[in-house]
Image: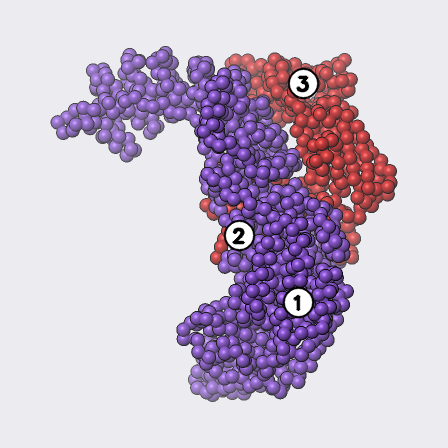
Amino acid sequence: MAASPAYGEEKGGSSSLGEPEYGHDPASGGIFSSDYKRHDDLKEMLDSNKDSLKLEAMKRIVAMIARGKNASDLFPAVVKNVACKNIEVKKLVYVYLVRYAEEQQDLALLSISTFQRGLKDPNQLIRASALRVLSSIRVPIIVPIMMLAIKEAASDMSPYVRKTAAHAIPKLYSLDSDQKDQLIEVIEKLLADKTTLVAGSVVMAFEEVCPERIDLIHKNYRKLCNLLIDVEEWGQVVIINMLTRYARTQFLSPNQNESLLEESTEKAFYGSEEEDAKDAKAEAASMAKRKPYVMDPDHRLLLRNTKPLLQSRNAAVVMAVAQLYFHLAPKAEVGVIAKALVRLLRSHSEVQYVVLQNVATMSIKRRGMFEPYLKSFYIRSTDPTQIKILKLEVLTNLANETNISTILREFQTYIRSMDKDFVAATIQAIGRCATNIGKVRDTCLNGLVQLLSNRDELVVAESVVVIKKLLQMQPAQHSEIIKHMAKLTDNIQVPMARASILWLIGEYCEHVPKIAPDVLRKMAKSFTNEEDIVKLQVINLAAKLYLTNSKQSKLLTQYVLNLAKYDQNYDIRDRARFIRQLIVPTEKSGALNKYAKKLFLAQKPAPILESSFKDRDHFQLGSLSHLLNAKAVGYQELPDWPDEAPDPSVRNVEVPEWTKCTSREKRKEKVEKPFYSDSEGESGPTESADSEPESVSEESSSSSSSSNSSSGSEEEEEEEEEGSGEQSEDKEEEEKRPKRKEKESSQKAAPGSVGSPSEEEEEEEEGAKKAKKKPPQGRKGRAETSSEEASASESSSSGSDSGSEAEAKRRKAPPSNRAGPKEISLLDLDDFTPAPPQPIPSSSVVSTSLVTDLEGLTLTDTSLAPTLLSPAFGAVRTYELLHRMAGEGLSVEYCFSRRPFPGDPHMVAVQIQISNNTDAEVKNLRVSEPKPLSGMRIQEFPEIEHLAPGDTASVVMGIDFCDSTQAANFQLCTHTRHFYVSIQPPVGELMAPVFMSENEFKKEQDHLTRLGEGKLTGMSEITEKLTLPEKCQSDHTIVQQVTSAANVGRVPCGADNEYRFAAKTVTSGSLVLITLEQREGAAAQLTVNSEKMVIGTMLVKDIIQALVQ
Amino acid sequence: MCFQQKMIHSLFLINCSGDIFLEKHWKSVVSQSVCDYFFEAQEKAIDVENVPPVISTPHHYLISIYRDKIFFVSVIQTEVPPLFVIEFLHRVADTFQDYFGECSETAIKDNVVIVYELLEEMLDNGFPLATESNILKELIKPPTILRSVVNSITGSSNVGDTLPTGQLSNIPWRRAGVKYTNNEAYFDVIEEIDAIIDKSGSTVFAEIQGVIDSCIKLSGMPDLSLSFMNPRLLDDVSFHPCIRFKRWESERVLSFIPPDGNFRLISYRVSSQNLVAIPVYVKHMISFKENSSSGRFDVTIGPKQNMGKTVEGVVMTVHMPKAVLNMNLTATQGSYTFDPVTKVLTWDVGKITPQKLPNLKGMVNLQSGAPKPEENPSLNIQFKIQQLAISGLKVNRLDMYGEKYKPFKGVKYITKAGKFQVRT
């Protein structure tokens, strides 16, 4: 805390340059100045008109956030600036929003519209940043908005926006995992993207959302392999890790012929043994048994394309490739990674730490790989201890008969180190070398025995422990050493070492028959002062001596056991009791007594000294789990190789050499140049990205035609073609193309029974210029999906998805599209016969025509005013404004009367019922000091002069909520008291019903959708599926529930399984159209069309709740 | 609800005295108390170098790096390659260094807003977004004294109002529209000798690690190719992403469109078959007498195989055993200091002249009663040799394509001691 005011002072000081009156240091009030006051200062600055003040305030707020202080109470003041023109203020507001939106969800909604606007910006970077912030706001209610925005951005023409969309996917998934299916569709689409910019991010999304859907990778496998080298480094890591897993499921083990002879073949490879000849024979034999292994070319492709990345400057990339080779490459090729890994040892110590852990694991399995780099693992006195110990581990793993002498010489220097932990580890390492390499066992043992006379007790103790383990292997020859160690008990104090010595003497007491009882004598004397583990070993020694040499040690044993009987530690008391029963024959003791000697002096297996890194390779190397040697949350097991290779043809795609630029692509490139050249035009690989979206757009047209279900046979043909179009090779596709176009056009003609001359024209045009054909297609898809929501039985999401794809395609098309309007009117006629043909602006002119459209809308509003329906008075809900207790006897309730508020049509009428439950008269009841949020207005009710006890008064007040669900706050005053109250409207009350005919409804809906289309598809439409409960399936209840949830009017409808409602928002008069379509059974689908996205979203939620309950 | 969240969740910056002076969350907020696990590990590790980079806690994993007296502690929730995080954190520290000239607590606190903006751009949802300095500098301008004065008067900002093009091009490391009046390209070939010399003066281990650092100030989109006289010397090379790997594989030529400004072009290792020339030798006599709480110290440094160049900037540092109380030495050249707390002896020698070899000699005072130190300390030597690449690597030529002007080109060679240790 001490540092923070000083910091604030500094900030305040700098602001004083600009504006003295605000430059007042907020902290100068001293420690006692309250936070509340300080924030007031900031609020004032945020409310000012000057950007410099706002910026200063935001900077101070961000500094607070950075220090982890709570700045949440500034939320309303900050969120207002979300639309600020100053880019830095805006950025800082974004920082703030992302931090606090989760805590202040309602207020955060206020900012949504700014981002929605940003999503439609012509500048790709603004679109991207809007999506980034929108998707970072963790407010569950905007999930549908995010979903739509992501879908939209996924087919954006800018790869940067598509990348942002890929980033947004995991964000949405973590907010609402129910969206998984839809998100997978987006991922699938983005995986097909051929720009390097997108590849890494989408694979990241894939790994997070659906790593199990390995089938999505097949088609993109070769592309990913080929793009890999150009992907940015972080993406490379993710892709390589994913492909490692993929390869493990799809290819055969390249080492399958050797797996049986793992150890011996390994030696053969690195030729350090003389058994070569034998191995070769064995290998040949096993080769003969199996059919020869041929590596899948795709497997080879992966290995070949990742190898250059070993040269990356990024340690994470190098490690990723190294683990890929370790897990996937044939043994003979794995060696290439050693050099790169050794290079990483020059890097930061944290990098060394991780790399050494992995090298330690690898060096157990593939020792030969690192042998040439042995000296790179030599230890310097300046290395941190944790690095030293890991290097030691590697050196030990690498030790073999040829290099052991060098390594031991090196170890000798280490033993004299000042770092005692490291010395202890070295002694253990020597022990391991001794057990692994028989040749040097005696040398090591001698060396360790010499260490027993070391001055440092820790060194001695560690040596004792290691010697104990070594002696267990061949005790008979080493009674001298045991004698030497017995003498050490006089000096050595480290409990573990004392315990080890005692155990050794006990175990081999027959080899040292004279010394053993004497040691026991000494230990009995000091028994009470020993550590617990030593005491246990004293008891152990006593027991063993009793069994072998009871004459000399009987009394001593009794004495020790008696001491132990009264020990403070229950383990020791227990052990003493147990041993006494076992060894001292009494009449009570059972059969076990006879076997006591066998029990105590059985041959015990020598401990195996092995690396703690053994078997760690079942974790994917380079992973967190491997490092921790424990499964981390979210760890994906590396699958075992399959026995039979899965079908390799799944990876075939239409373009075998995808970089090849076909003539068609060249032509297309020419057409789309203005759109791609700025971003992608330069790179060969990315150009070919065009081919995919095209087939997609065709797909979408086919899917929309299938939903049209006008002719089944055509639908089949179309689908078949779609499939083959994707899989067949490029040339083939090109041949097919003209044919397909014909089909398409004829198919298009078929449903349109209204034959038109422009039909032929269209066909001609199609033949000539492919690009011009797109707009009508796209628009058709769009129009259909929106209007046919009702009958699009499969899934509305996929429909709108493909629609939006087509939409994006349309945007890509040259703006100078002359054929547009004519064709459109034709298509519109197909779809909605009653709707008057309407000239639809092409995208380039949409902004101007939009204005006129909007004007039209407001005009109709006023003309519609008289036709406003009187509200359907169902069950009107009343809400409590002031409880009797809180109001000291005054209770106030309110309800939304759903009548237009007289005097101001933009206000919502709120009926307020005030009851006086006190026994005194209440006077001067009035509203005062309304504190409306920006733009909100309150029309107070006329003052109530007096209210007699027991009386109830009813008044009406008007509130203009600005079409938001923000609460209106005001004070309710009596002559004595003030009560702070607030009215929060349910979203359904922010609108008034409108009457319209079915045709008008359709027209408006169409209009709205198209309006959205001009800017951003689907932003004006929200669709949700629901299941109607049994009691809510009759006409009457449905209508009642909907009208009770929202102040809407019913629109007559031809179809009997559909319900339509219309309303417009009170303040801005925006239309809200509701369609509820009942499907078979209890299933239903609710669609809300509205320009006001937030209202739409919340309305859907409210209506569903009303219907489901 | 699903809590599967990957990559970096939060970042805490902690100074040596254990204050958390900055926190940033890319997802929901993680309480500062998670750092307690880190402090616990730090306490256990005794010195800062030994804090394990990866710590597992009940709900999170902490991955940390230590740079310039600051701990960068990141909070992870699920499996992620640890090197990915470590490498990224170092990139963050590099960026701070690049922006503020130093990566210190004061610099970070003084520029907290820029730091925050940078962190915001560098990670999206915990996944790296823009880490190239060229792009970041277009997004967020680095602070300069002039700019901060101008900003405070005009109220303008550090955030670029033109949006970066680099993100969008397929040369993401280079910003667009670079213009210089003087077009220059400088390359520094820096080689470091890593060596362990044993007691008797023979080389246990030695190898040469090199880097080529570049400072390129060229207008437009220059396409450079750099070739060597003896490229076969380079055994193991790692590249800046701008280098075309295929050209190197086939022709051993470095072909690239450079980033603007300073960057590391390649780092390499010289093949270990080549014998490494060790430019200096050290004669030493360090002994501690039994039972007399004193010892002798006598070290002489001399030149050896230096190819006619002067060895300069010689500094020797020695970590003396704990029992050493003080040292009474005389240096024939340069000056020495001994820190009785850390027990570090530093001898700043300067230039070595073969005529008169620098020598440091005198008495060592030991704690009375303490046993004689088991081990003699090892000597760490630093030195520099200008105008020499010890491996013999030579740049052949630099060609530029794609632009018309004639740039000024320069190559500088320098050899340094890397991890150069003499055991005694």
Residue B20 in percent (x, y) is at 57, 46
Residue at position x 70%, y 32% in the image? B249
Secondary structure category for the residue under label 1: helix
- Classify mark 2: residues with Cα within 10 Å, few (<14), some (14-19) or many (20+): many
Distance (Cα) linking label 1 and label 3: 73 Å
Residue at label 1? A779
Label 3 close to label 2 by CB (< 8 Å): no
- Choose top left, top right, bottom left or bottom right for residue A1027: bottom left
Q: Amino acid at mark 3?
A: Leu
- In this figure, which residue is indicated by the disc labeled 3? B275
Q: Do discs 1 and 3 share a chain? A: no
Q: Nearer the viewer, residue B319 or A479?
A: A479
Q: Please state, as top left, top right, bottom left or bottom right, where the C terminus of chain A lies in the image.
A: bottom left
Q: Nearer the viewer, residue A199 or A400?
A: A199
Q: Amino acid at mark 2?
A: Val
Tag in front: 3 or 2: 2
Drawing shade for chain B: red
Q: Which residue is mark 2?
A: A209
Residue at image x 43%, y 17%?
A: A438
Residue appearing at x 25%, y 32% in the figure: A574
Cβ atoms at labels 1 and 3 below 8 Å apart: no
- Could you tell me residue A387's position as x and y percent? 55, 30
Residue A92 visible within the image: no
In the image, which lettered chain appears purple?
A: A
Q: CA distance from mark 3 to mark 2?
A: 53 Å
